[in-house]
Amino acid sequence: MNIVPRRLRLALPMVATAMVSLPTLTAEQPQQPALAGATRPNLKVLQALPESQLFPLMNLVADSLGVRCDYCHLQATPDFTKTPSNLGGWAWSSDEKPQKQKAREMMRMVLELNRSQFAGESRITCFTCHRGTTQPARLPPLPPPGGSAVTPARPPLPSVDRVWSNYVAAVGPVDAPARGTGTVMTGWDERPEGRYGPVEITIAGPDRYYVKLSTSTGTTTQGLDGEVAWVAAADRVQRLAGDDAARLRRIASRYRPLKERPANLQTIGVERLDGRDAFVATSRIDAKTTLALSFDAVTGLLRREVTTVETMLLPLEEQVDYDDYREVNGVQLPFQIRTTEGAPYGLVTKTFLQIRRNVPVDETLFRPPSGP
């Protein structure tokens, strides 16, 4: 699920992933960091988890067992006029289903194993044993896979210097835009269950970003203006801070080529993406966040990035796939970007019909609009 409570996701069904998801919007009100247990008295195990991580983590727990929310939670009054993912009517505090109590026991077991055996690192997760089923397998399947009895040698990997230089050469010269100019991307934002709408994204340098997403329920905008991050919907404006502002900055970075090599980047392996080899390089962003970048072995272009954030129970992942690169004023840019963070209805595909670079941009666009 998204990090925003469902009551707001009904009003903003397409904000997830394309934009930072938020608690209730209030006009120009600073956002205060909150723990999930502060407003959920029946939360027994994850009280210390940040509220912004609760729903994404629950999605990954469900994915790990191959189930959905209704496996543990009671949906008392669903609204069948909504899309299947937004029926609502959840009684989150209800303990009616025995599966919920079992889930709590399993979470405590995972936390204790990691505490006692791995110094508190989340090395053991729900997926470690369950692998997409409610009944973990005890033994490997028979017959065992064939092949040589000798472990194959790891293929040689290019140095991170070579991978990065190939990427820089493939992208082309990315100069800082002149003052008052930027890049404008227009196209479609499409999600499962027939949800789609036009989207326009404007980038001006590393610290100015604006996105406008129109849906059947209205228009939502978000922006960065230097250190100021904000979201506006239904004539309400909210300044962003903390994790939400940081996530908006990460989202904004997807729409321009990487200009600076991430710190401590190192190549760690090769993976297959759509039938092509890609060199995987990782970087430690901070104590809890890791970035993995997959560069096409032939073209050198960035094909995928995965951001992993450690939590008290299991890591949260957000994956971005880049495709359909085309030259725009001498720079290779992806005309299709797909994002997912674990929820089956959270897959977002942005298909751009036009990308224009070095075009005049009104800098007031990036500033938060006035409240009502």
Image: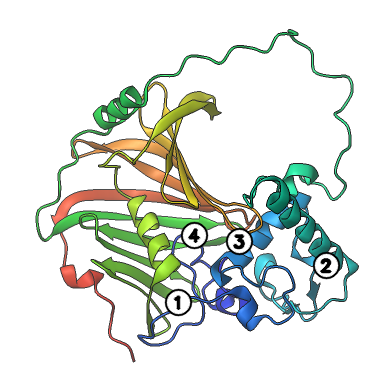
Q: Are marks 4 and 1 in contact (CB under 8 Å)?
A: no
- Which of disc 3 and disc 4 is earlier in sequence? 4
Q: Residue at x 27, y 49 (%)?
A: 355
Q: Residue at x 72, y 50 (%)?
A: 116
How far across and how far down the image is residue 337, in percent? 43, 47
**Mark 4 or 2: the one toward you:** 2
- Left or right of residue 110, residue 316 in this image: left
CA separation in Å, label 4 and label 2:
27 Å
Residue 279 in view in this figure: no
**Mark 3 or 1: the one toward you:** 3
Q: Which residue is mark 1?
A: 218
Q: Are marks 4 and 2 in contact (CB under 8 Å)?
A: no
Local secondary structure at mark 4: loop
Local secondary structure at mark 2: helix
Residue 369 in view in this figure: yes
Local secondary structure at mark 3: helix
Q: Which residue is mark 4?
A: 17
The amino acid pointed to by label 2 is Lys
The amino acid pointed to by label 4 is Thr
* Mark carried by residue 232: none
Q: Which residue is mark 3?
A: 56
The amino acid pointed to by label 3 is Pro
Q: Residue at x 63, y 82 (%)?
A: 39
Q: Which residue is mark 2?
A: 100
